[in-house]
Image (cartoon, helix red, strand yellow):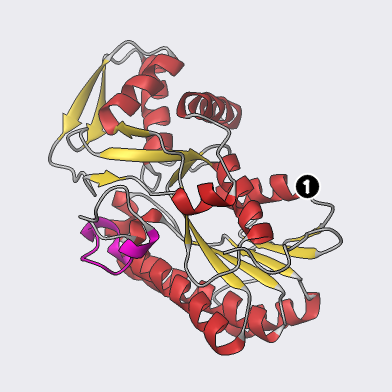
Amino acid sequence: MRGPNPFSFAGKRVWVAGHRGMVGSAICRRLATENCEILSIDRGELELRDQTAVYNWVVENKPDAVFLAAAKVGGISANDSFPAEFLYDNLIVECNVINASKFANVEKLMFLGSACIYPRDAEQPMAETALLSGPLEPTNEWYAIAKIAGIKLCEAFRRQYGCDFISAMPNNLYGQGDNFDLESSHVVPALIRKIYEAKISGSNSVEIWGTGTPMREFMYVDDCADALVFLMKNYSDDEHVNIGSGEEISIAKLATRIAYIIGYAGEFHYNTDRPDGTPRKLLNDRKISDLGWKNEFDLTEGLRRTYASYLESI
């Protein structure tokens, strides 16, 4: 539902927690058009896992609005290798920021979740009501549990204290500022780097984890940032909101499309000893569509922009 009075960023102090990350930096780019003051602080100056430090910083700087985009993120390999960090670090960061925001009387807060919060075998496309309706995907359940806790914490603070804290769930994000490290990256940046390096080295084959059959929906990060700002302005309710592109593709076809953009003519080798993850992950985005938001970038354009940003980074 819409809030009784739409939130305006004009003249407000807005803290983007995680401003150096892919999503946080996209939010900062989007907020540059909102006539607001963007607050940010580097990790070396504020440890978000330190409850007292976070509380003191928020109370002292008095943000009017907060985007909680700070998180420990990674792909299947990273989740499998560091389950304790993915659960503990994300739990403690979101608890510290949300709790401090309440005591500092922050007017509005956006908690950024992930589509992995939904059950592995949820009915597709996944509606917001699918939350907690079944077992999670084992390859990322630690991260998912932390994100579910963040959603529920926002709901609890809204119910008990009347805080205007909301949550949004984007699907698989990619774009400018992505992580291209092969040990910790998600599928789009990993494929871009693998295929690019195969082209440069003259390799005639690229290894892809799994069977290539899982279906995924991808969203360009600047679209996500635009949706988050839109929801902060226009949405106020308990339930989280899905943010999707509506465009679904298999991992195999994604690899083919990236290869075309990069200009790679080799083959793909599917390593079926590696996990596929959730078989299908498509969001039902009717709620945000009914509010009047639509994404701007299709997958091909988003991939072109992401590849260009990768070339600039190497």
Disc 1 on helix, strand or loop?
loop
Question: Dividing the image into 4 quarters, which one contains the N terminus?
Answer: bottom right
Residue extending furthest bottom? Answer: 160
* Residue at figure coordinates x 58%, y 77% from the top left: 98
* 16 to 59, vertically: above or below: above
Instruction: List the residue tagged with mark 1.
Output: 32
Residue at horizontal 42 percent and vertical 12 percent from the top: 263
Given residues 151 and 143, the one toward you in this image is 151
**Residue at 39% from the left image edge and 43% from the top image edge:** 186
Q: Position of residue 236 (x, y in %)?
A: 60, 68
Up-down: is 175 above or below 28? above
Between 78 and 93, the residue placed more toward the observer is: 93
Is 129 part of what is drawn in magenta? Answer: yes
Q: Amino acid at mark 1?
A: Ala
Q: In the depicted view, which residue is nearer to us: 5 or 299?
A: 5
How far across and down, in percent of the image, does residue 60 sit? 79, 80
What residue span does the magenta drawing correspond to? 128-142
Q: Position of residue 115 (x, y in %)?
A: 38, 54
Q: Residue at x 22, y 66 (%)?
A: 134
- Left or right of 254 on screen, residue 17: right
Mark 1, residues whose alpha carbon is within 10 Å: few (<14), some, or many (≥20)?
few
Instruction: For the C terminus, give its image quadrant.
Output: top right
- Residue 293: in magenta span: no
* Spot occupied by residue 241 in the image (x, y as percentages of width and height): 48, 59
Left or right of 139, for residue 158: right
